[in-house]
Image (tube, rainbow, N blue to C red):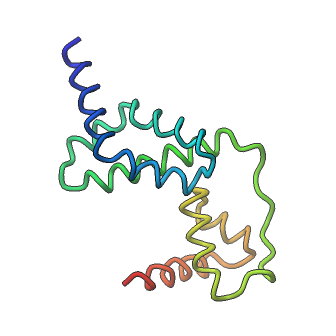
Amino acid sequence: MGKKLAVYSDHLSMYDQYGALAYGVILQIIPNEQLAQEVLVSLFSSISLQGCNENVVNKTICIIRNARAKAVEYKTKYASSTSPPINENLVSEDAIPKLVFDLSFRQGLKPEVIAEKLNISRERVLKAFNEYFKLFR
């Protein structure tokens, strides 16, 4: 019983410190506030956060990864259907890096799936990731 209470206390402490950050990540993936709050509660009540508490150096990164994974899992589980292919003729060449990142981060799609949706090569998808991250250097 004492160990369970300690884990609960750790999760409350992490929620106080990182709840807003996790909620922001979740909202990017699930824009519905009510659903995002459900995912947030699920995240901070899960045992998977125990690893974040033990990893002091990268606690923020661990919280972000877990929040994203939980949101993508929830979105995948409750999505009504897969989204239709995107017409690459409607997407400008300059917008592809951001679109590729959004499809990967917010929808949790793998590079192969993104390439298929955009009707471009997997190599072009990987190059788009590189281009997107260069903007932040």
Label count reads: 0
Residue 112: name its quadrant: bottom right
**Residue, x 61% and y 52% (percent of image)?**
31
Task: Give the vertical position of 107 relative to 114 (above or below).
Answer: above
**Closer to us: 73 or 45:** 45
**Closer to us: 37 or 44:** 37
Q: Is residue 76 left or right of residue 126?
A: right
Q: Is residue 13 left or right of residue 73?
A: left
| Image quadrant occupied by the N terminus | top left
Task: Give the vertical position of 131 relative to 113 (above or below).
Answer: below
Question: Which x, y percent locates residue 101?
Answer: 56, 70
Question: Which x, y percent locates residue 64?
Answer: 39, 53
| Image quadrant occupied by the C terminus | bottom left
Task: Give the vertical position of 82 relative to 123 (above or below).
Answer: above
Q: Which residue is most to the bottom?
A: 93
**Residue, x 25% and y 36% (percent of image)?**
13
Q: Is residue 126 left or right of residue 83?
A: left
**Residue, x 39% and y 35% (percent of image)?**
44
**Residue, x 35% and y 49% (percent of image)?**
63
Question: Which x, y percent locates residue 115?
Answer: 67, 71
